Amino acid sequence: MLKSQEIQLAQSKRRERMAEIQKADEINDDGRTELRSLTDAYQNAETEYRAAVILEDAERAQIKEPDNAGREFERECRSFDLTAVVGALVDGKPLSGREAEVNEELEQRHGVGQKGVRFPWEALEQRADAVTDASAGTSGELASRPTMNALERFFETSAAGRFGVNVLQVSGAPSFPEITSGTGLSWVAEGAGADAGTITTTATSPAIKTATARYLLTRQAIRQNSALQQILRRDLSEVLREGIDLAIFRGTGADEQPAGFETVLTGGRTAALTDVASFSDFLLRATEIQETAKLSDPSQVRIAGAPIVAQTLLDTLISGTAVSEMDRLKSAGFSTLWSSQVSARGARDATDKGASTVYFGAGSNNAYVPTWGSPELIVDPYSESKSGKVALTMFAFLDVLIQRTATHYFKLTGVQDRA
């Protein structure tokens, strides 16, 4: 019980006793003495009560203060210096300072690295720090804005991220359930009810796949290049982002690869165009996606293909006009993205014509890239020592999980082009 509550209880008992004495027809000397004593005690307790309330309010305010440990760790992660890690390991020295503390914290969270040094996803970010105005009148707006974590910021500029694939941190052996049938809306009369239908679900558990990237640096660059930190961030992040994109769209599921859209879209969710890319063919498939996924806006349908397909659509003009097939596609409201990671050009024939694959997707939250822990970095100054180079090997642990393939995705193969 709080001190203020104990005082309030004692004050209540004093008031009751004082009321009993005052109700008597005649108050004797003992009653007067007791009444004076109760009055003095009551006044003193009131002072003590106010002090207790002030102290308890201060304690509550202290308890309500946010725990800034996570924010401070994120700040340290953003200042993580990859060049310090490389330099220390090349010279055979242990990590120290911020890099050692961050690595230790990541090992506590995600386990000790097999042979390398754990580093945060923030170390791969490429973005300018901006000063945010938190003056009066804007704090509510700032609080309502969604905040992305480092992994989401790293992934947002990738082709798969623009296609609606989400990335998330997981641990252990997570299970992703998916309702396949049994849901529906019922209309009932006043006082009536609807019986619950049987819901059919299926669950998929992703498995850890190890992505490996190798990067060579000269010892001279390590010691003389003042921009090495920015170069490492740029190159390592691009290597990892490109590899993840390729796995999401073209992963075969064999040879330790994840299974991407190319592999999971089979049967009725794929068709061969075997013709030149056109607005009419793309409109047909995009409309099918809008219907099967029950979308209310065509902008939620996303079309992804190789850059050569975009060139074909732009070069193909409607007869007698300056309007291209791409103009018609944009006017329909569909979102498009063109990346060499989505699909490679097919083999070219004598007329320099080839074919590639185009994917159609509906919205977000249907495909995921689960990641386990933070990446690891191994610095090897020995294997390439003959040429004076240092090998950096980066590991990331992830998988690809695609749901609702029967309604939200479609693959169009044999989309021909002419350079």
Image (cartoon, grey):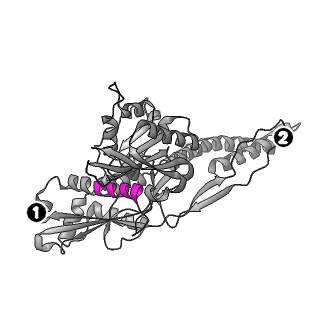
Q: Quadrant of the rendered structure where residue 41 is?
A: top right
Residue 138 drawn at (x, y percent)? 42, 31
At label 2, which amino acid type do we have? Ala
Residue sitting at x 18%, y 55%? 228
Residue 192, label in figure? 2
Residue 312 is at least partly visible in this image: yes
Say if 412 sits above or below 84 in the image.
Answer: above
Residue 144 is at least partly visible in this image: no
User: Bounds of the magenta span?
Assistant: 237-258
Residue 106 drawn at (x, y percent)? 38, 64
At label 1, which amino acid type do we have? Gln
Secondary structure beneath disc 1? Answer: helix
Residue closer to the observer: 128 or 355: 355
Q: Quadrant of the rendered structure where residue 17 is?
A: top right
Secondary structure beneath disc 2? Answer: loop
Residue sitting at x 82%, y 37%? 22
Residue closer to the observer: 89 or 45: 89
Going from N to C along the chain, the mark reached first, 2 or 1, is 2
Q: CA distance from mark 2 to mark 1?
A: 80 Å
**Eye-nearest disc, 2 or 1:** 2
Residue 181 drawn at (x, y percent)? 66, 52
Residue 220, label in figure? 1
Residue closer to the observer: 215 or 64: 215
